[in-house]
Amino acid sequence: MKTNEEILDLFENHLAQIQLPEEPKDLYAPIIYSMSGGGKRIRPTLLLLVCEAFGGKLQDALPAASAVEMFHNFTLLHDDIMDNADVRRGKPSVFARWGENVAILSGDAMMIYAYRLLSGAPADKLPRIMDIFTTMALQVCEGQQYDMDFEKRQKVSVVEYMNMIELKTSVLLAGAAMIGAVLGDASEGDCKKIYRYALELGLAFQQQDDLLDSYGTVEELGKRIGGDILEGKKTCLMLNAMSRATEPDRDILRSTHLDAKLSEDEKIARVKEVYDRYDVPRTIQQQISLRFERALAILDTLEIAVERTEHLRVFAQNLMGRKK
């Protein structure tokens, strides 16, 4: 079996061989720019690892892995438009470089092209894979809409937030894993289990991202700490604190990011004082650890030899930044 690094190299080589048309230039150049712009390739890597764990052929899984990565990058193009984001992965976003209209149309083409790539999967498995992929794609859109809805609402529950990030971020990882299981001829029961494994892992990863945004380091996060606080974003930290805070503390959480008298550092410090008062970081870390351990425990229940799940354990540990 190939290691995670070998799987990633295999995928990058395959991706580099995909030939997109050159014309019209302003349609395809942004796609090439986006797809070659780095990224951790988390979802296609997991798809391929799962396929191999169940004894499938990696060559058969590469088209689906490429489709998942193309779809993921399509969502980023449109996210940047909705967020008015000028930077993506340390360089100008497609939206900033080419403008809104190009980013919309190139994103649309990426979504369509993802289905073209997916059609390269083995014909006998294609209907099942297509169903998983389409369901996953629709759920991602539903999650994005909930996220936009929450920006306009004063009250959002922790349960609603977790459902939103499950749809917006976790189902893409889980769908990729399930497609890999189907391509590996896993049983229906194992397909559902591997979906749950990836879903728990995705939720833990998003919660950890929320936590690092306020309590991590620049090296860990790759950007300035406290961005979510400055935006007044409804994260798992914010909503956990809101659910338990006194009304004066809730007012601090609601209004601090709007206070023009405070510097950015003062805003971050003030909100974190409230978080610390209610022991929010420890609570969120406990939830992250629980989801991570739950994901690993699912691997023990699969109908394959335990040694075949080793690379999936390493994947989980790497994703969460764990040493062991």
Image (cartoon, rainbow, N blue to C red):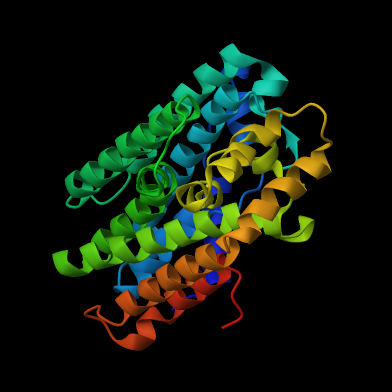
Q: Is residue 24 visible?
A: no
Q: Residue at x 72, y 22 (%)?
A: 97
Q: Is residue 114 above or below residue 30?
A: below
Q: Foreground residue, 243 or 149?
A: 243
Q: Is residue 57 above or below residue 212?
A: below
- 51 sits left or right of 255 in the view: left
- 276 sits left or right of 125 in the view: right
| Screen quadrant of the N terminus | bottom left
| Screen quadrant of the C terminus | bottom right
Q: Position of residue 40 (x, y in %)?
A: 59, 55
Q: Position of residue 20 (x, y in %)?
A: 53, 31
Q: Foreground residue, 297 or 16?
A: 297
Q: Position of residue 245 (x, y in %)?
A: 52, 50
Q: Is residue 60 visible?
A: yes
Q: Foreground residue, 135 or 186?
A: 135
Q: Residue at x 58, y 46 (%)?
A: 16
Q: Residue at x 57, y 12 (%)?
A: 101
Residue 192, located in which quarter of the rendered image?
Answer: bottom left
- 14 sits left or right of 182 in the view: right
Q: Is residue 193 above or below residue 66?
A: below
Q: Position of residue 162 (x, y in %)?
A: 39, 49
